[in-house]
């Protein structure tokens, strides 16, 4: 009975996310309310007759995962808030791009930038930086939404080929289902999917983007902070690969270095670097918290385990393709965990296709990935409905990439 009640509450919560513009209630408020309510009910009416200690253990496991991601988000967003407020990102874009560039050309530049950057950094940081680039350009709202859609897909596509780029990729790797060399096979198919989406979204674009001709001077102190940001990203990558240090720890360490160094730099007209934490979009973080609480309770009531039975009735290639659509509704981390724990037996090619599906499939809906959640908080007008207008293009691009993985993996592993 309690499982049914919780499932209904979760459905109501997701419906309220979808209809946010109609009901005028911030999605952070609704997800946080229903997320915490479901867990409170799990204590009052124990799931599967669990003891309170068992429910506490389950909650603690979920909170640990949430806290890790939450703190990582906070630290990454603080770096970006500092650099963006200083005009550093805008100035850097001016130096990279010409004074004029076609809107179609910009589409491909943004796609490549987001894809490559997310391959080395985490998805959240790549999204924050890429969105900041677009927000600093003078674009119409409809066109800006197209670029945001491309960024979400490109960021998720770029992260699937490296264990530091996507959590689910790391999970599958740690279970010895694929090797690092296997994962590199995903690069070209993933990039092909991105180029496909960029081509589709740019079909009706014919104008030019004019960048500000006044060159913004980049302060030396801001260059130092940007360098610390880059070193933090690269250090996070190396520390995780070489010593298995959790990314949140190295990123918080980098943030602390930024605070200390900024305190020593010339700071005539600048506020204390610590104050930039206040510029972080905490409504996005609370939304992320609420969503993960909801997904966590779905995992505990066993909803996520049911779909693994599909492998008994359908080919793994077909089910893996469908898993991509599931990950756009349900967080891909517990989805992947449920699959790994189910003991499904697949070939390396099929595991690679699953890796792509869970990593990129979340892009089909805006609520299906951290990149989408962050983008919603940054881009005015980007919501569930406006993002859904490009669903056909997203499905085509996802399908092209998925088929590409099949052929690339079979060719490379033959």
Image (cartoon, rainbow, N blue to C red):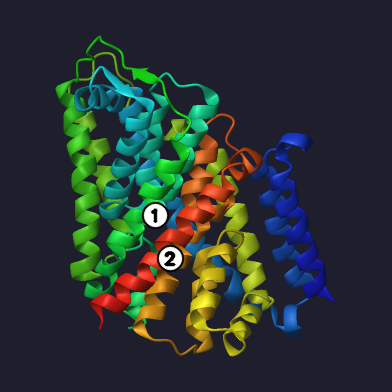
Above or below for 19 versus 359? above
Left or right, residue 281 beside residue 154: right
Return the disc, 2 or 1, that comes first in the chain's sequence. 1
Q: Say which of 89 and 73 sits in front.
A: 89
Residue hosting label 2: 402
Quadrant housing residue 225: top left
- Determine the secondary structure under disc 1: helix
Left or right, residue 295 beside residue 413: right
Above or below for 273 versus 161? above
Q: Residue at horizontal 23%, vertical 19%?
A: 267
Quadrant housing residue 279: top left
Q: Say which of 411 and 343 sits in front.
A: 411
Q: Which quarter of the rendered picture does the C terminus lie within? A: bottom left
Q: CB under 8 Å between callouts 2 and 1?
A: yes
Is residue 386 in view from this perspective? yes
Above or below for 313 versus 197? below
Percent position of residue 97, x then y:
24, 26
Above or below for 216 versus 2? above
Farthest-out residue, right: 1
Q: Residue at horizontal 23%, vertical 48%?
A: 232
Percent position of residue 280, x then y:
46, 35
Farthest-out residue, top: 214
Residue hosting label 1: 193
Q: Say which of 150 and 380 sits in front.
A: 150
Q: Which quarter of the rendered picture does the N terminus lie within? A: bottom right
């Amino acid at each position: 009975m309690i499982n049914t009640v919780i499932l209904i509450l979760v459905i109501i919560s997701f419906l309220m996310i979808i209809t946010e513009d109609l009901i005028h209630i911030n999605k952070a408020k609704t997800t946080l309310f229903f997320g915490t309510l479901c867990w409170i009910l799990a204590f009052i009416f124990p799931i599967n007759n669990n003891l309170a200690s068992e429910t506490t253990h389950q909650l603690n496991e979920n909170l640990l995962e949430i806290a890790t991601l939450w703190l990582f988000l906070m630290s990454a967003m603080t770096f970006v808030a500092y650099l963006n407020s200083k005009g550093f990102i805008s100035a850097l874009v001016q130096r990279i791009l010409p004074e004029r560039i076609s809107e179609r050309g910009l589409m491909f530049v943004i796609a490549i930038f987001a894809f490559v950057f997310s391959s080395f950094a985490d998805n959240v940081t790549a999204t924050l930086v890429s969105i900041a680039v677009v927000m600093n350009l003078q674009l119409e709202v409809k066109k800006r939404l197209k670029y945001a859609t491309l960024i979400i897909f490109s960021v998720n596509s770029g992260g699937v080929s490296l264990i530091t780029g996507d959590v689910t990729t790391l999970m599958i790797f740690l279970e010895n289902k694929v090797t690092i060399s296997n994962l590199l096979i995903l690069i070209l198919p993933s990039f092909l999917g991105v180029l496909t989406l960029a081509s589709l979204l740019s079909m009706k674009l014919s104008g030019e983007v004019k960048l500000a001709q006044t060159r913004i001077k980049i302060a030396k102190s801001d260059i130092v902070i940007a360098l610390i940001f880059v070193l933090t990203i690269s250090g996070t990558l190396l520390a995780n690969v070489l010593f298995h240090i959790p990314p949140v720890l190295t990123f918080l360490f980098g943030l602390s270095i930024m605070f200390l160094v900024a305190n020593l730099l010339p700071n005539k007209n600048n506020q204390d670097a610590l104050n930039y934490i206040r510029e972080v979009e905490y409504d996005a973080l609370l939304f992320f918290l609420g969503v993960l609480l909801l997904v966590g309770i779905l995992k505990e009531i066993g909803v996520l385990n049911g779909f693994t039975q599909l492998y008994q009735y359908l080919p793994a290639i077909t089910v893996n393709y469908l898993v991509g659509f599931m990950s756009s509704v349900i967080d891909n981390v517990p989805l992947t965990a449920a699959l790994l724990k189910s003991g499904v037996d697949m070939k390396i090619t099929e595991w690679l296709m699953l890796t792509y599906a869970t990593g990129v499939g979340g892009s089909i809906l805006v609520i299906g990935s951290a990149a989408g959640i962050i983008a919603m908080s940054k881009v005015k007008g980007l919501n569930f409905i406006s993002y859904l207008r490009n669903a056909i293009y997203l499905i085509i691009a996802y399908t092209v990439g998925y088929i590409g993985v099949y052929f690339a993996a079979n060719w490379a592993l033959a």
